Image (cartoon, rainbow, N blue to C red):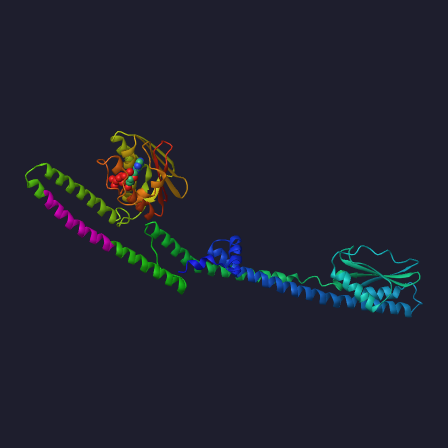
Amino acid sequence: MKIGAALHYTPLDRGMRWLGRFLPKGLYARALIIIIAPVILLQSVVAYVFMERHYELVTRRLSSAVTADIAALIQIYESYPQDREATTLTRIASESLQLDVDILHNTDLPPPGPKPFFSVLDETLSNELRRQIDRPYWLDTVGRSNYVEVRIKLNQDTVMRVLARRSQAYASNSHIFLVWMGGSSFVLLGIAILFLRNQIRPILRLAEAAEALGKGREIEFRPRGAREVRQAGHAFLEMKRRIERNMEQRTTMLNGVSHDLRTILTRFKLSLALMQQGPEIEDLKRDVDEMSRMLEGYLAFARGEGGDAGETACETDLRQLLEEAQSDAERQGHVTELDIVGDPIITVRPDAFRRLLFNLVSNAARHGDRIEISANHETRWLTLHVDDDGPGIPADLREEVFKPFVRLDEARNQDEGGSGLGLAIARDIARSHGGDISLTESPLGGLRATVRLPA
Ligand SMILES: Nc1ncnc2c1ncn2[C@@H]1O[C@H](COP(=O)(O)OP(=O)(O)OP(=O)(O)O)[C@@H](O)[C@H]1O
Ligand SMILES: [Mg+2]
C-alpha cells in the first residue's frame, strides 16, 4: 500500500469526494442511483425532444389547415358578393369545416388582447395567418378554453369572425405517450430493485460476518452471490480459519511451556523445603515465589487470557457481573457504589468480561478507599466507569501503565504490587470485543477507568 499517495488528490478525486458527501452512504442506495439516474435523464431528454418536435410539427400542420380553410372562406365570400349576409357560407362552414363563421358589419378589429406568456399555438397560428392570408387580424387563444377565435378584417367596415375548436389547431393529447413511458420504466425499475437487492445481500452478510469476527462473536456465514463477492467471502473464511489455527497453536505451545516450567519450579520449591532453613533460603524462597507468580501472570497474558481463548460471546446479565464485583470489593472493606442505566443485558464473552472488571476493580481497591462503578447501556455501546479516590495516575503515565509489566507501585509500595499485567489484559479484552479502555481523572479524586465497547 502506498500511504504517501493518499495525500495527493487530483481535482477529480476531490470532486468525487465532494459529491460523495451528498450521496447516500449505503451501497444499496448508491447502486439504485447509478441505475435510476441515467434512466430518468435519458427519458427526460427523449421526452423533451420528442414532445417539443412533435408538438411543434403537429400544431403547425393543424394551424396551417385551419388557416387554409379560413382563406378559402374569405375567397368564397369575396367572389360571391350577392350573399351579403353569408348564410350559405356559414352553413357550409359549420357543416363541412366545423367552423363557426359570422360576418360583422360596421365594426373594426378590437384592440389586441394580452399575449399569452408562452404559447406554441398563438405563435404558430399568427405565423400561418400572416403567411396565407396577409390581412389585418385579431387572435384570441386565451379565453373560451375550448375555442380559438380569429377575426379578419375584410374591408373598411366588414370583419369575418371565425370560431374554431382548439383541437382543430393544436396537438394536445400526446400525454398518453408519457404515461406509457413512465409506466414501463416503473415496471423495469421494480425488477431492477429486486435483482439488485439479491446482489447486495451477500455483501452485507460478508460485512456482518467480518464485524462479528472483530468483536469475537460467532456468526454463521456461507459465501454467496456474484463471483467476486463469493471470492471475497472465501478469502474471509480462509483468513478466519488461519487466525483460529494460529490461536490454537499459541495456546498449545504456551500450555506446553507453562507445564514444563511449572514442573521445574515445583522441583525447586521442593528442594528448598528440604534444605536447611536459614535467611538465605528465605530469600531464595521469596524469589522462587515471585518468579512463579510472574510466570503465571505472563502466561495468562500471553495466552490472551480470556481474550479469545475459545470463549464465544453470549447474552450476559451486566447487573449480576457488577454486583459480584461490588460485593468482592465490599468484602475487602471498601465502600462501593453501583449504578446501571439502560439495558442490563449485554453480549460479551462472560469470563473475559468478568476478568476485565475484576482487574479494574482490584486496581481501584488497591489504591483507593471508595469505589464507584457506573454503567450506561442506553445505545448500542456500553460505557463503564470505575472510579476510585486513590492517588490517581499522572496524565503523562496513563498510556504507559497499559504496557505489560509496567508498575508504578514499585516506587510507591513494593510489597503490595502485582505483576503489572492487569491493565494490559483488560485492554486486550476490551479491544477483542471491538472497544477500548481509557484512563482519566475521577470526580472522586483518584483514577477513572472507562471501558467503551459495542455490546
Ligand atoms: N486505580 C489506580 N490508581 C492509581 N494507580 C493505578 C490504578 N490502577 C493502576 N494503577 C497503576 O498502574 C499500574 C499498572 O496497573 P496494572 O493493573 O496493569 O498492574 P498491577 O495492578 O500493578 O498488577 P496486576 O493487576 O497484574 O496485579 C499499577 O502498578 C499502578 O501503579
Ligand atoms: Mg492491577
Q: Quadrant of ligand 1?
A: top left
The N terminus lies in quadrant: bottom left
Residue at the location (43% across, 58% down)? 4
Q: Main secondary structure of the magenta part?
A: helix
The C terminus lies in quadrant: top left
Residue 209 belongs to the span the image colors magenta: no
> Which percent across, then down, holds residue 221?
35, 56
Asked if residue 92 is positioned above or below residue 33 in the image, the reply reads below
> Which percent across, then down, holds residue 157?
93, 60
The answer to whether any part of residue 402 appears in the image is yes
Residue 267 belongs to the span the image colors magenta: yes
> Which percent across, then down, holds residue 312?
29, 48
Q: Is residue 337 left or right of residue 331?
A: right
What are the residue bounds of the magenta stretch?
248-269
Q: Is residue 309 left or right of residue 26?
A: left
Residue 73, image quadrant:
bottom right
